[in-house]
Image (cartoon, rainbow, N blue to C red):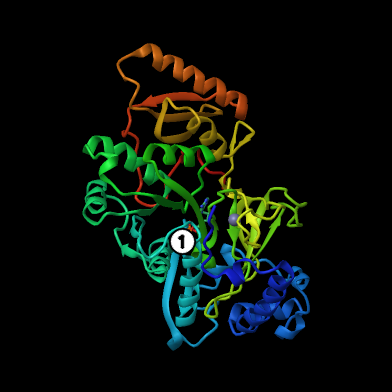
């Protein structure tokens, strides 16, 4: 394969050099962090009052973790480390408590972020000849502007399409000859469902690649999108606390996501003990940003669960790869005492070709017990008025799920395109059980 690199010197930098670069950048980041009220206090308590206190990358382990709650407590300006007049943009993600976590960017921060995004996009084989339809939410959410800037940096023609409205999306694809898409994986599947309804022929489109991210999805879901839309799908990972997308991305080998280690230091810890996991084991990803002066964030607990690959990648990049995120540590459902991750359910159902493109997991109280219902759409090849294949499919899903998650679920089958779809991240779980307070 002919791999293309946006910044070959950095992307293929020998590990020892890369680590030396990380240390140098970490010191700079800490110098910035010490200007933010939150870290000035937090770090002085940990005995760090000057960036020169850091002698090696290992010293990072002396730092306390930063959590989403810390960011909320620091709202609005506790994490700001440059004068307000030098800030050119903010992004925010609104949590369930209503207090947003807000990230500020200087002009240089925006440039650096666009550079990482360009590296991701170019590494999938795109270039200035591509027409890029960015079908994700713009606004405070980082997914829209993040990929948008990266696309422009590469020189692609970027269409700021935004999320939703499949008919309009198809029209733009046809009018402008779109070759690259960006969307959530659930929206890409939805698009495929709607394509048939809208009578759009795949051959009338020029699509080649898609970037899919912002929510977890399984390898089977990726394959499904690739084969249904006849398109090459690349996994895109990021979070607003670390700028947004552009933290880690798949290369053309599609075996894990390269974390740009000159921009981010990644650790994986056991979420209970917070100790590092053994090489290759799954745990919570901890990230330290090395490329943002306006809002430094050190050792951020992402809650995202993943593991590192040990071996170097065939593409020649030296930056470490992580496996696709299987879920968040706070996603775990406890159903009648059994621990289940929604991703385990997705893995089972999306591997069946009779199952359609959308599903919903419902957990309810049924007397004293919890009841799990898995609602899935069926593929358009199955007719809803023929009960024999439907019953057989129901049984098959039930049995396979029971074998995989040790819970006997209720299975409901729905017509293709009939389950709710959200414009932003897919809502896969509806848990109506009363919360313990
Ligand atoms: P919020 O924190 O409000 O959800 P973000 O857009 O910052 O807003 O969301 C980041 C989170 O989205 C990540 O921490 C992760 O849980 C999820 N995420 C993003 N990209 C992926 C991906 N490719 N695979 C799995 N999960 C992802
Ligand atoms: Zn690679």
Give the answer, above or below, for where 77 lies relative to 373. Answer: below
Say left or right for 249 vs 377: right
Q: Could you say where residue 356 lies in the image, as x and y percent from the top left?
A: 39, 31
| Residue visible at 28% across and 46% down in the picture | 205
From what the image shows, is residue 132 above or below residue 343?
below
Between residues 383 and 335, which one lies in front from this camera angle? 383
Category of crowding for the residue at label 1, using alpha-carbon neighbours closer than 10 angstroms: few (below 14), some (14–19), many (at least 20): many
Circle 1 sits on which residue?
A: 121
Is the shortest distance between ligand 2 and the CB of mark 1 under 8 Å? no
- Residue 18, percent across and down? 68, 71
The front one of 396 and 95 is 396
Residue 93 found in image quarter? bottom left
Give x and y (percent) for residue 338: 64, 33
Image: 329 above or below 148? above
Q: Residue at x 39, y 41 (%)?
A: 230
Give coordinates of residue 367: x percent, y percent. 52, 26
Q: Residue furthest front?
A: 2
Is any part of residue 263 visible from this angle?
A: no
Tell which residue pokes out farthest to the top in this image.
Answer: 388
Q: Secondary structure at mark 1?
A: helix
Q: Can see residue 285? A: yes
Q: For the image shown, how many numbered marks are present on the structure?
A: 1
Q: Residue at x 47, y 29 (%)?
A: 373
Picture residue at 29% right of the left edge, 58% below the top: 161
Q: Is residue 90 left or right of residue 5?
A: left
Q: Nearer the viewer, residue 264 or 4?
A: 4
Choose top left, top right, bottom left or bottom right for residue 25.
bottom right
């Amino acid at each position: 394969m002919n791999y293309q690199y946006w910044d070959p010197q950095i992307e293929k930098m020998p590990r020892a050099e890369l680590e030396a670069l990380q240390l140098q950048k970490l010191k700079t980041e800490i110098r910035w962090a010490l200007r933010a009220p939150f870290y000035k206090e937090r770090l002085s308590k940990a005995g760090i009052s000057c960036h020169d206190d850091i002698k090696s990358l290992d010293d990072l382990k002396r730092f306390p973790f930063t959590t989403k709650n810390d960011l909320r407590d620091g709202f609005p300006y506790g994490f700001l480390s440059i004068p307000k007049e030098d800030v050119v943009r903010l992004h925010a993600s609104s949590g369930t408590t209503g207090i947003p976590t807000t990230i500020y960017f200087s002009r240089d921060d925006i440039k650096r972020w666009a550079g990482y995004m360009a590296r991701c996009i170019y590494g999938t084989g795109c270039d200035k000849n591509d027409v890029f339809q960015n079908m994700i939410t713009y606004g405070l959410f980082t997914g829209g502007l993040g990929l948008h800037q990266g696309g422009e940096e590469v020189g692609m023609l970027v269409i700021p399409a935004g999320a939703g409205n499949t008919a309009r999306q198809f029209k733009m694809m046809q009018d402008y000859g779109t070759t690259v898409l960006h969307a959530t994986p659930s929206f890409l599947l939805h698009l495929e469902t709607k394509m048939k309804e809208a009578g759009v022929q795949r051959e009338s489109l020029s699509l080649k690649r898609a970037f899919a991210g912002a929510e977890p999805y399984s390898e089977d879901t990726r394959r499904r999108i690739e084969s249904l839309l006849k398109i090459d799908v690349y996994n895109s990972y990021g979070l607003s606390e670390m700028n947004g997308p552009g933290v880690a991305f798949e290369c053309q080998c599609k075996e894990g996501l390269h974390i740009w280690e000159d921009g981010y230091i990644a650790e994986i810890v056991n979420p209970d003990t917070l100790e590092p996991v053994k090489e290759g084991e799954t745990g919570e990803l901890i990230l330290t940003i090395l490329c943002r002066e306006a809002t430094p964030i050190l050792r951020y607990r992402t809650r995202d669960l993943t593991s590192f690959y040990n071996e170097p990648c065939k593409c020649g990049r030296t930056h470490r790869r992580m496996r696709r995120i299987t879920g968040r540590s706070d996603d775990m459902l406890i159903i009648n005492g059994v621990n289940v991750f929604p991703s385990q359910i997705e893995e089972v159902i999306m591997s069946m070709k009779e199952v359609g493109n959308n599903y919903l997991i419902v957990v309810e109280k049924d007397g004293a017990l919890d009841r799990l219902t898995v609602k899935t759409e069926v593929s358009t090849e199955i007719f809803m008025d023929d009960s024999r294949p439907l019953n057989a499919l129901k049984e098959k899903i039930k049995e396979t799920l029971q074998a995989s998650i040790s819970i006997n679920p209720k299975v409901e089958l729905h017509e293709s395109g009939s389950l709710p779809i959200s414009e932003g991240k897919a809502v896969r779980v509806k848990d109506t059980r009363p919360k313990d307070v």
